[in-house]
Structure formats: C-alpha cells, structure tokens
Image (cartoon, rainbow, N blue to C red):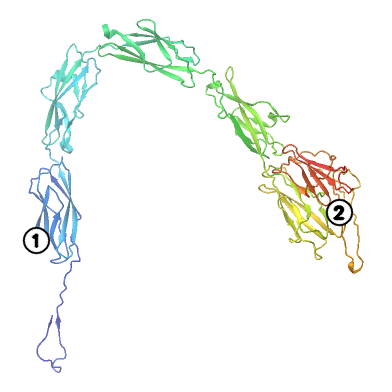
Amino acid sequence: MCEQNPTFLDYEKAKTYEIYVQLEITDINDNAPQFRRDKVELDISESATPGEKFSLTNAVDPDIRPNSIITYNLSESKHFSIEIQSGIDGAKYADLVLKKHLDREERAVHNLLLTAVDGGVPVRSGTASIIVRVLDVNDNAPRFDRETYTVNITENAPIGTLVIKLNATDLDDDTNAEIAYSYTLYTFEKTQEMFSLDSNTGEIKLKDVIDFEKIKSFEMHIQAKDKALSPLSGQCEVKVFVTDLNDNYPEITIQSFKSAIKENAAIGTVIALISISDRDSGDNGKVDLSMNQHLPFTLNKSSESHFTLAVSEPLDREKVPEYEITFIVTDRGSPPLSNNETIALELLDVNDNAPVFPQSFYTIPVMENNAPGAMLSSVAAYDPDLHENQYLVYFITEKEIANTSVSMLFSINPENGNLYALKTFDYEREKEFLFHVEARDSGVPPLSSNVTVHIVILDQNDNSPVIVSPWHTQGSMAEEVIPRYTEKGSLVAKVVALDIDSPQNSRITYQFLQIPDATLFSLDRFNGEIRTMRMFSYKDPRHLRLVVVAKDNGNPALSATVTIKLSTAEQVVKAIPESTQVPLEYDVFSEVNLYLVIGLGSVSFLLLITILVSIIVKCQKPKTTKAHAVPPACRNTFIPPRNPNITDSTLISNDAYWYSLFLAETRKGKVVIRQPIPKGAGYIVSSMPQSTGQTETSESTASTLQVS
C-alpha cells in the first residue's frame, strides 16, 4: 500500500520524496501437522472408571488459519475416544477418554492411532502411535478345574509316591497370579501326617505307608490363595481311596547260569535253572513265568515252580553277539503283581565264516614301464569272525605264466592284501596276467576263499616307427632311379613304417619333411606312396633329395625319418644280383646304364627305354631293448610268381596288426611281409631282388629280417 502527499512537489523546496510500502504474504498449506512425539505410551489400570481422561501429545502446524490444525481423529476403538480442546491462541489439543471398563485378562495392550488434520487445500495430516498398557488389579480369584478330585492308591505304595498334582489357575498377572496351596481347617491332622502338600506345585505325595486294613479312605480340603496385597482364594476337595492288593511281589531265583556259550551250541543246550515263588496265598500266590520278547531260547517247565532255559534255535554270533534275556513273573492277584530279572548271555565265536572278498573278480589296469615295487591295488577281504578267526593272511596261488612263476612277477602283502608288481611290464611282450589270490583266516581249522585277479597291461607310446621300405643302411639314405620321362601319377617310391605299439598308438601317417619342389611329388599320408604330380622338365635337377617322416598316433607322438636320393636317367638297364643269398647288414647295388641313340637327321628321335632293376638288400639286426627280443637269423624265402592283378603296392592290415600279405614293389626290388604271426610278436620283412629273366616264375631267394 502506498501513501502520497496530495500537495504538489516543489523541487526547490524538497529535493527528496519518501514512499511507504506495506507487503502482505499470503499463507499456503505447505506444512503438514507434526506431533511432538511419534509414539505415546500410557499405563492405565484396569480398575479405571469410564469417562476418565488422559492427556495426549498435541501436534503443531507452522501454517496459519485456515491451514493450521482444525481437528484430531482416533482409530476405531470400543474402549477409547478423544475429546478436542481449544487453547486461547486457537491451538487444538486432544485428550484420550475411557469409554468402557478395561479387562487386562481380555486384552493387555491397546494400539491406537491419533491423526491431526489441518484445514488446507489439499488437506495435510500427521499421525502419532498411542500404546495403552492395561495394568492388572487382583480381580480374579484362583480356581481349580474341579471342585472334587477322586484318587485311587494301592496299599503299601512306596513313600514319596505322587498321589495327585493339583493345578489352580489365576487370570491375573505377576504377584496377583502367584498361588500358594495349603490345607484348610477341615482336613484332619492324621490325614496331614499321611500326605504332604507342596505349597508351590500343588503335588500331594505319600509321607507314610498306607495299610488298607487300618484305613480305607482319606479326605483332604485344599485351598489355593494368590499373593496379592488383598489376596483371593479358591478351594477344592480331594478324596483318596485305598485299593487292597496282594502286597507281596513274586520272586525269581536263577541257578546254574552259563554267562557265555559257543555260537554253535546244539539245540536243547541248557543255559540256566530258574525257580519262582510268591509269599501270598490263593490266586495271589500263583505265579506265571515268561520272557519279554521272542528269542532263540525256550522255557521248559520241570515242576510247578521250576523251569530250565534251553537253546531252541541255531545261534549266530555274527548276527547277534549278545542277548539280554528278561524274565517276567506275574501273580494271579487282582490286580496282579509282577517282577522281572534280566541276565546277559554272551556268544563265543567259532570259526564258521570264510573270508569274503568284496568283488568276485578284480580287473586291475597297469600302465607299461611301471616302476618295480609299485602298488597296483588292494584285494583285501573281510571276515566277520573274531580274534584269531578274523586275522587274515593273503597268498598268491602259485602258478606259472608263460613259464614264469607268478611270485617272480607279483607279490602281495600277507597282512593287508596290497598287491605289488615286482618287474617292469612291456605291453609289446605281455598284455595280461590271470592268477588267484587266496585269503586264509587263522582259525582252527582255518577257512579260506580266493578271488581271480586280472592284470591288464596298458600300452604307452614307447616304440618309434621303424622304416622297412625303402631299404637303407642305418645312417645312410635310400636311392631310387627313375626314367626322366616318367608319366604324371607314376609311383616313384613307397615308404612303409611299422610300429609294434597298440593299435591306437601304432597308426602311422606320412608327410614330407623336406622336398625340393612341392609341385613335383605328392605323398599319400596313409599308405606312404610317393607319386609324380607332373612330368619332369629340363629345368628340374637330375638328382633330388626327399625326406619323409613317419609319425605314429601316440601322445606324445614318436616318429622316424628316411632320406630318399632320387636320380633321373635317360635310359635304364636292368641289373642282376651276383648272388641269391644276401646276408644281414649287407647292401647290394648294381647299376648298368645302357645308352641307345636312335635317330639320324631331322627324322630321328631319341627313344629312351627305362628299365632299372636295382637290388638293395638290407638285413640288419635291430638294437635289443627291453621291449624287443633278439631277432633270429635271416632265412630264405620263396617268391611265388607275381600275380598280375596285384598293383604296385598292396597293403592289407588292421590297426598295425598284419593279417595278410603286404607287397611293396619299387623300381629296385620287392619287400614282402608275410603273416599271420602271433599278435604283438612283431613282423617279418623279406627283401627280394627283381627277376630279370624272361619270366617271373623262376625261383629266387631273399634275405629276411624278422623283428619280434
């Protein structure tokens, strides 16, 4: 609001002019009511009267009217309501008003929610939790679940026997619910001397022996009183009736008892003599004897009060080593009295169980090249007998395997059945062993059993491939001579390698390790055939050097290499060996070159007839290793006429075991490997020079290399 003076301004008289501005800020409802305390706890006695008021915390709202607090709301309750008060400053206050009597036994805690609501738009509110705990007053007297209790007790019941346990309840809390039990003045002193009453637990027990002939019943008046300042009490009546019984228990007498018998005791063997008695008379003195469960024993009655305990079924200590036999005697009184006696019977072991192996057949894999003395496995047996009948000794049943005693190959620990190898095994010589292990106990007489042990030798890739074709002396290279004008795809040479390892490890693959021209020759990686990929040109050298590696399938793989010196010639002349018998470690090579030049003038041409017969026979004994025996001497081999249907190279095999005929033919001669031979025994290689006669049906001899 601005106030101005209506007179005109005179600049010369007044150089300043004052304007008064009054700014009024209009309130918005941007604050919710908030209680000073979020939780209000009240303790109200259950004796409080309806209409009684209890102050509650108020809520504040910094907004001004009409955005300030205008009312309070209380969550629904049948016991409480609120009364809203207004202060001089217009603030609203709420009081809690009791509408209905409280009962702590019905509900001990009341949870209420007080909400303050302002008058803004939109309406804002705040809440506070009100917890009302109801304080107990002693408004409930102790109560018994019955007014009269009836109890039966037998005469001669032992002192301290529990007659009855009274239980009174009080719905109040704390000390108002604590109860003390006591006799009232209506209970006779004699009765109080016979029975004791525990004031805390309400247990009534015998203090003296009851005799039916002296007194037949008792009557007790019991009072239960709480421990409040103004105590309340409840009462009940207990009637005790004494039951007349025969007061003498039957007795058992055991004589001539054997505490231990052998498990092979015969049926009918007497274990004990038993007599029974009862000092009562009539039916109360008649006694019956029985056992508490079914056992392999029987009670045989010899007279009215005498019995014998005897074996009725076969015994087995391994199933039940000990029996606890309980005899029960019961008289025929009403009600009957009974007694019992327990004896322990131990079964002594006899050697009636042979050792048992957990397996009927043991298959033990052993990797070749094992260390001598290494443990292979355990073939321990189990004997359910005891003591010396259980102590086992292990033996290897003496047997010869391939003219060798088993005891020279294997040993067994006689105490625990651990099996050991005494030598290093070679898969290429021995693949399996079969023998028996016997377990014998120390009983009298001893019992034994045996088990079959199958030792399977596993192969290692410990043998390198051996190059058997083309033949060459150790440390030298093989030589081949072919015509210069060889057709594309012609067989140049064939590399053959053998491996005496297992079929898995002995699969051979071939590849070039060194080749002067990769476009000139190809090598079949499976059969080792080297063939021309094109014809020779004038640029190709006359002497070529090829290096082929033969690699097995082991892990890691082993290999062997052969170097082939390949020469090309314009013409080839056959060579005939000087002798038909070639000894071991002797190389024969003869080469005669026949040159024929036909052609005169411009119409002549060069005809090259290439026939080269080269004989290289190598008979060299392989070095002796642990996996190879000393090879036998060379022998002559008859070479039958060549079948024209056989190609330049024929190989029939099955995973390095050769079952038929292998024929490898090169330009120099033939290599023949004849089978069958025993599995794993090796292979026989025969080398034969190529025949130069008119036919190939003539007999010729060859040197033979046998590798075992």
Q: Residue at x 76, y 54 (%)?
A: 530
The earlier-in-sequence mark between 1 and 2 is 1
Q: Residue at x 89, y 44 (%)?
A: 580
Farthest-out residue, front: 603
- The x and y percentages for residue 509 are 70, 50
Could one spot residue 629 in this view of the protein? yes
| Amino acid type, callout 2 | Leu
Quadrant position of the N terminus in the picture:
bottom left
| Secondary structure of the residue carrying numbered label 2 | strand
Q: Do the residues labelled 1 and 2 touch (CB within 8 Å)?
A: no
Find disc 1 in the rendering and name its residue.
87
Find disc 2 in the rendering and name its residue.
612
Left-right relation of 262 to 688: left
Q: Which one is in front, 687 or 69?
A: 687
- The x and y percentages for residue 631 are 80, 39
| Secondary structure of the residue carrying numbered label 1 | loop
Say if 496 sits above or below 356 in the image.
below
Farthest-out residue, top: 303
Residue 371: mark: none
Q: How crowded is mark 2: few (under 14 residues within 10 Å), some or many (20 or more)?
A: many
